[in-house]
Image (tube, helix red, strand yellow):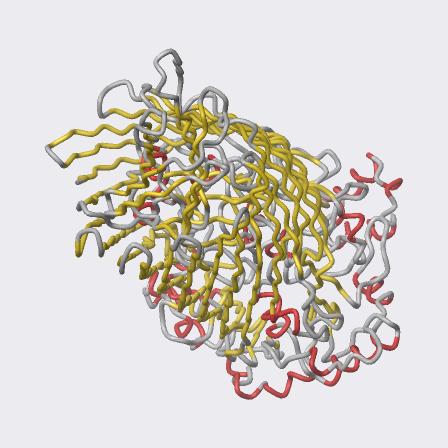
Amino acid sequence: MAQQAGLQIAVVRADSGEPVEAVEVEIKNRAIGYVRTMRTDAAGKVRLEGLATGGAYQISVADGDGFRALAAREVELRANFSSSVTLVVAPSVAEVVVTGSRAITRVNTVNAEISASLGREELAALPIEGRDVLSALVRLPNVVPSTGFFTEAPVVSINGANALFTNYLIDGLDNNENFLGGLKFPVPLGFTREVTVLANNYSAGFGRTANGIVNYTTPSGGNDYHGEVYTLIRPGRPLDARSAFPRRDLSGNLVGDSFERRQAGASIGGPIVRDRTFFYASLEYTRDRNTNVLDAPALNTVTNITGNNEFLLGSLRLDHHLNDEWRVSLRGNIGLVTIDRPGGSLGGGNVTFPSAGSDQDRNSALLAASISYSGSDWTYNGALQFSRFRWNYGKPKGASGPQATIRDQSGLTIGVVGHPGYVFNDLEETWQTQHRLQRRSGNHRFSVGGDIIRSDFHLLGGGNRDGNYTLELTPAALAALNAKGVGARLTAADVLVLNPRVLDYSVELQPAAFGTDQTLLALYAEDEWQIGSALTATLGVRWDYDSLTSKGAGGGDVDNFAPRLAVNYHPGARSSLRLGAGVYYGKIPYAVISDGLQRSTTSAAFLGQLVELQKVGLIENGVPLAPLTFSGNLTVSPPCATVTACPAPDAVQGLRGTAPINEARILSPSGYQSPYSQQFSIGYQYQPSESLTVGADLIYNRSYNLLRLRDLNAPAPFSPNISALTVANVALLRAQPDNAARQALAQFLGLVRSQSTADATRPVAVVPGGARQITVSETAGRSTYKALNLQINKAQDEDAYAFRLSYTLATLNNDTDDINFRASNANAFDADFGPSANDRRHVISAVGFLYPLNGLTLTLAALVQSGQPVNLTPDASIFGTQDLNGDGQSFGESFVGNSDRYPGARRNSDRLPWSTTVDLGVRFVLPARHRSIELSADVFNVFNTNNESGFANAATTSNQVQFGGGAPFVQRNAGPPRQFQLGLAWKF
């Protein structure tokens, strides 16, 4: 499938719409020296597969056989798709006059795929921050900005689903960071010829997701040298508008008013040997600058700290045509991304010193080779790719050592120095090979294919093996420390040498590297059956296997057969009716298994708890228990009064068997099933002219086996006494002197259950060396998605304008949003079935392109969305805690937000206001012979709207978690304010 593209050409009569048989069609691509002539079959069609995606194809019929000559506009192909062109030819009889467009290139007459694309001209004209192609996908139907589940999560959601489950491809080959999900190599604008979102009912050749696919088609060289050298800047203040809320950089991390960005890059493509061998190379460099404030007056340090993010993205593609039928391609991508956490924060109040700062590295490398054969009856595509991804989330800026959190005698934290306090260093190495063979036989086009991906993971994770201290300094010790005058250069050693009082001391017992492998297998067969000149049926079946389903006690999910059916009926040259139905299997993120290893223990007490769970039927009888556990990371807290009294890290290993654990994970005792969706759609396209296309699609998806967390040792359900939530009682609760008193009163009123009371109802008692929560990732979640899409697209053609307009009416309900989602009360997931975090009812995307003068392009892009759901949670100033049922906090809640609901409120039962963002792009080209200079200016959020929803951000920093009970709305975040971006490019 890699870099292969297809082209279906139909020739029909203008007067009757009947197919024209045995007419010669010429297919020419001047950029790569490709010329081929073929005759139409009985259905009036010509079909080519295995074509190169480089250059543009012109399709024409010559005078003769009673028809006038006709040539269609040039068509650019995208990877892994067969584009369709219909030539409406007029008879060469004088009295017959046919007016209007005669080339139909924007109607899908091949299958039922629901997809949309952005080509290089649209991408170049759109206002896109930092040339980040992924963020531009919100201009397409079925795509919205995403509320992610950690800072670096992908910024777009397809069909309202979790963006981590989207399948990201480059020329049809894997580009997924397979630990959590998202892009491995962040494909820049300079190495994107076209990007396509496949939302529903795509070919059996695509899989590994129950959601959508993002496929990048990369550019290639041709017989003419072409390229650009550019620079792009985000000057920041004072041009940018001020905002009371932080914004995000390209990595998803928070930045403030001081943020600036500088970008520069170059690309060039051309021939190595004309008509035979071509190259395309791209190099882009980005540097972000952001100033943080270190605000530690108690340590005589208030200063600015500057951090710099760096992105270096390099790509190369080589294409060689062995002859008219065989071609080979090589592609390489290298991404070096460093996110700087220098210490401090965007405003006052942060006391993290540079010695506790860290860097986040996301480094990727991909090397792919593919070969294609395109014959008259047979087509073959094969590919081999190796990729490597290193994700070092918290690389210390300094040497290894302890961390020290410093408090004064009032309990206020006045400084954090030393190590970042944790380790997360993941290495993923992946091989992929992919093959597809196609045979034409009469009215049938048979395809068979296979795809194998093998990934090896190694994670070094856990806490700090050298210890994390929480220390209390006396006024004398604080004065002695300040007398050193080290200021922002303060380290943990400077503090520990004073031998202060220890409030807490924690040590990671095993920061070991561990991991396993994941193998993804896929086989598929497909028959594209040309039933008649106007009717095509595609019948396919795909089989997927994910080796991670064999972890735990399940033995592997091997029956994932996915039938697919697509029917395409085009009664005339200008219209097409599509119907699709199919099953689509996804994969399991490796983090599911990694968490089961990293957060597990093999202590005798924990194994004893598992035995008891098996006795009461919560673990199936006969399942071996030891293989479900692993000697993973474990942090213990040995008691000690002063630093010198604390045992050395190497001396606390004996605590592994007796340390209390709030939450421990095991691999699934019932096994894992692959997530899957059942997709149904019906769509209609109509092209009234060569430049205008309208369409409508109805979509219905049901998904099953979605990932979530279950507590095998969950306490009994708890229902707050809602009748006690009177105005008088709420006032009384607020009047209590502290949260401990509030919680005690709330327990008396039946609004809160204490943790000890909850523990008493757990199936298995909490014991030293065991765990309170015994959690497991299960594949049992479900969702339902319904949508109506309406589109009108106008290409420029000979006009001075173009536009894209889409409206989506949709709803997505589920009982899990993420791998870390757990039920709010005693595994009662049915009670949590409700709108997803990224559910929107209405989305309007409008993009207009205006060409008022030669060389001038004005682009106006608007995105209007109804508000995202709001989860109503308890207010600790009323209840004394947010954990009303006493089941304790889960590790995963740091990614998905607090799981308890306000008494009586269902999940995501409220809504944020609508959001509206309007962006403006201006491009002015100054021609100079065969070269040009382009000046550009982008203004994002032109009207400086304060959007409370509808923008990409992390789940825990969004406005989607609010206090219930009629509490006032608290705005914690906002979409980006008005921002400017200026560019200069030399193009040739």
- Counting labels gives 0
865 sits to left or right of 963: left
Q: Residue pushed farthest top?
A: 95
607 sits to left or right of 916: right
Residue 717 quadrant: bottom right
Q: Residue pushed farthest left?
A: 929
Q: Is residue 86 above or below residue 187?
A: above
315 sits to left or right of 832: left
Q: Is residue 723 above or below residue 355?
A: above
- Image location of residue 466, percent across then percent down: 48, 78
Camera-side residue: 288 or 952?
A: 952
Which residue is painted at 37% across and 57% down in the image? 340
- Image location of residue 895, percent across then percent down: 59, 55
Q: Is residue 440 above or below residue 601?
A: above
Camera-side residue: 448 or 193?
A: 448
Camera-side residue: 250 or 510?
A: 250
Q: Quadrant of the C terminus?
A: top left
* Residue 39 seen in the current view: yes
Which residue is painted at 21% across and 51% down in the image? 275
Q: Quadrant of the N terminus?
A: bottom left
